[in-house]
Image (cartoon, helix red, strand yellow):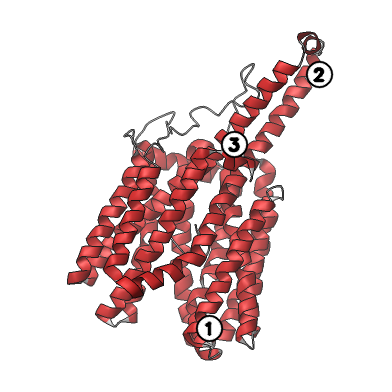
Amino acid sequence: MPPVLRSRKLRRIILAYSVNRLGTWFGLLALLIATYDHTQSPLAVSALMFAALALPAFAVPLLVARVEASRRRAALARLYVFEALVTAALAVLLAHYSLPVVLVLVAVDGTAALASTALLRAEVATAGREEHRTAHLAADDLRDALVAPAEAAALTAPAEAVAAAGEKGSVEEARHRAEREANAALNVAFSLTFVIGPALGGAVVAGIGASAALWIDVGSFLACAALLVDLSPHVQEAGSDSIRSRLAAAWHHVAEVPGLRHLLGAQMVAMVFIETGGPIEVPFVKSTLGAGDRGLGLVLAMWGAGAVLGSIGFARLVTRPLQQLLAAGALLIGVAYLGLALSPTLAAACVAGLVGGIGNGVQWPALISTVQRLTPERLHGRLMGAVEALGAICLALGLALGGALVTVSSTRTAFAIVGAGALISSVLLGRVAARALVVGREPGEQQVEAPEGDNGLAEPEAAGHGGSRPFRTTS
């Protein structure tokens, strides 16, 4: 077990997240099936997906900033309770179906879901750092107890200064590693739910109906609220607590750190190509390969299995440079799309899907860890909200691009185009990330010297915390 998973808080967060992701699959599949059954319109299904997965992008940063500004107890748990209430309304509404009302409720629920995921990612990083701090202080106490006072006094002042500087650097690197281990653990959980969720959710909807599946989703939200009731995402700002000032602080940080700004731009280019594959896969497997629904399910299952393998691989590669993992993930997805373009059989397409899934399992947590490393801890929640919003926008663009490519060309040509785009963007992404990470975790941020006796663990001023999309590149 990775050292960071000794944290009970982190294990509880991961459990809550896993329960929520499984419930989300139940709810999403129930709404997709119910919408098509009531409307018999693929356009209505597309509108539902846009409302749930893309439209919330424009409100997520605002909601994250609002929750972080709140001093109310259990603010994150309240967000999950809100999702439960909206989902319950959707379950009741299915008996008197109205597409406009469903779209509005789904957009509201999607906004809360993306915001809660962003805040939870910030809490995961915080839990990882807290576990590292606890372990480090325990090691210091043991060392102090074992070293004789005479031996400690024999250290010269210059030697003490050199040791302190080296220790501070090693402690900072250990903190980065703890964050990466925590992100990796969460991503493994996401990948497992990516494999289990669709199959289990589809069986539940087919067996007991869409409304019952939505009520199960309600239960998952309430379970999350109970597990996270003691987490407080409040962040104390040095200046004003207004929502505008909090958003301005996040925007100012992105504007002042060119490496982070360029990284997000390069990731957006890569993600548009990555998210384009979804609309192409269905006609490719069912029509081009003639493999039918079972063939499509098999390719998607192999992609999910690859995501699990990639997540485990990322967890084992916590010492590898992030820019390498970030570029490698996008590269593997590009290779997978080119492989699909050339696949003569369903078996070959499954191998390509496995490779693409591995890329997904590596790329997204590498992005999260890189953004966190380039961001002060007090801004983690807001930057995670920006990343979630970016992913939602790229999903919308990718779905539109994929549909357009299939319309004007063949499925193989479409896969070849997006595969080439992903390969090129992987090179760009790796170079941009390498330049950004040379500067360090918090470029432009004035570091606070550790007070005497604090072992180099002092936080930047006002930096501490007070206390969902189930698709490929997000968790």
- What label does residue 72 carry, if any? none
| Residue 295 image label | 1
x and y, in percent, of residue 164 in the image: 73, 23
Residue 321's spot in the image, x, y percent? 71, 50
Which amino acid does the dot numbered 2 rest on? Ala
Badge 1 density bin: few <14, some 14–19, many ≥20, Cα 10 Å = some
The secondary structure type at the circle numbered 1 is helix
Task: Give 119 or 139, whichever is nearer the viewer.
Answer: 139
Residue density around tag 2, few if under 14, some if 14–19, many if 20 or more, within 10 Å: few
What secondary structure is found at the residue carrying circle 2?
Answer: helix
- Tag 3 and tag 1, C-beta contact below 8 Å: no
**Label ID, residue 159:** 2
- Residues at discs 2 and 1 in contact (Cβ within 8 Å): no
Amino acid under disc 3: Gly
Foreground residue among 345 and 5: 5
Picture layout, residue 454 above or below residue 261? above
Cα distance in 3D space between marks 2 and 3 = 29 Å
Circle nearer the N terminus (2, 1) = 2
Vertically, is 80 above or below 138? below
What's the CA distance linking mark 3 and mark 1?
Answer: 51 Å
Residue situated furthest left in the rendering: 96
